[in-house]
Image: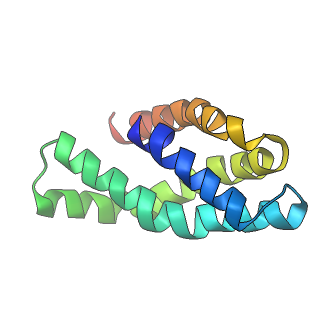
Amino acid sequence: VLWTGLFNHYWYGWLARRVPGAAVGAVIQKALWQHAFLNPFVYLPFFYCYQGATLQLSLDEATAKAKAEYIPTLTRLWSIWIPTALVMFRFVPERHQVLLTAGVNFLWNTVLSLTYNS
């Protein structure tokens, strides 16, 4: 809820102000901000910190888990979220982008759960 609802609401608003419009160039710039900056350097580290805390892992255990899973998770993230971002930034009005993200995020979290918690 905090990430998808609250954070993304402000993030997508910032992107819309920074890179206005839905022309191909703007879509690519927004997708680059999302997937070359936000996801690798903010979202995934936050995800692994949160996961380590909820699983009550020690700092060493959480760090080892993140190191082992980071690249495969980022690759999987890009395979789902880059196409989603391109479609979303091109065709979905800003006011509905968080809603689309929430729906796709449900599928993404299902993939993560099935992959890493068997």
Q: Looking at the image, which residue is at 75% across and 45% down?
A: 88
Q: Residue at 83% x, 57% y: name it.
A: 21
Q: Quadrant of the N terminus?
A: top left
The C terminus: image quadrant? top left
Nearest the viewer among 87 and 117 is 87
Residue drawn 36% across and 42% down? 116
As rendered, which of 71 and 89 lies closer to the eye?
Answer: 89
Residue 113 coordinates in the image, percent (x, y): 40, 35
Q: Residue furthest right?
A: 23
Number of numbered discs visible in the structure rendering: 0
Q: Position of residue 29 (x, y in %)?
A: 74, 68
The picture quadrant where one finds residue 59 is bottom left
Q: Position of residue 76 (x, y in %)?
A: 55, 52
Left of 39 or right of it: where is 95? right
Where on the picture, by quarter, is residue 97? top right
Question: Does residue 104 lie above or below 84 as drawn?
Answer: above
Please tell me which residue lies in front, 32 or 95: 95
Task: Reply above or below: 75 against 99.
Answer: below
Above or below residue 3? Residue 82 is below
> Could you tell me which residue is drawn at 31 percent across and 66 percent down?
67
